[in-house]
Amino acid sequence: MQPTRERLQALKLNPVCHRVQLTELVREELAELAPLAMEKGEELVLEDNEDCWVETEPIALAIALQHLVTNALNFSPPGSEVKVVIGTHCLSVQDQGRALKKPK
């Protein structure tokens, strides 16, 4: 896969939205991040809705998902679980890392 910067450049030049099977896109991105999860001793889990389709620019969505999951892996304790949940109307990344404190 191309580095993020190259993918973003291509996206700027030719953004194309189309119908994407979300579960398939998420599985591909999680497979790409599996070595990082294994290195950190964490588990990637996908809770999905097989019939979830979205109209999106798939490169942009893949990059956003990679950033969210990488952040979750980096800030979760070893032995924990990072879960991506695909619901009927949402996509979420859940982890067991410490929450950020709200500014006073």
Image (cartoon, rainbow, N blue to C red):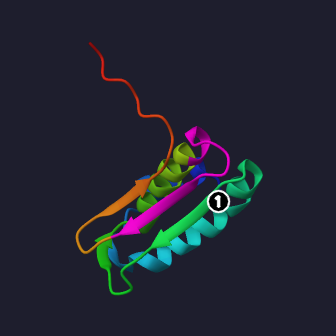
Task: Name the secondary structure under disc 1.
Answer: helix
Q: Is residue 13 visible?
A: no
User: Horizontal and vertical percent for residue 90?
Assistant: 27, 65
Name the quadrant of the C terminus: top left
Q: Name the residue at the top extreme.
A: 104
Residue type, label 1: Leu
Position of 72 compared to 17: left or right? right
Q: Residue at x 40, y 29 (%)?
A: 100
Residue occupied by mark 1: 33
* Residue 61 picture quarter: bottom left
* Closer-to-camera residue (57/54): 54
Q: Looking at the figure, which quarter contains the N terminus?
A: bottom right
Q: Which residues are magenta?
A: 73-86
Horizontal relation, residue 58 to residue 44: left or right: left
Q: Residues within 10 Å of mark 1 (few under 14, many from 20)?
A: some
Please name whichever residue, 34 or 7, is drawn nearer the observer in this view of the structure.
Answer: 34
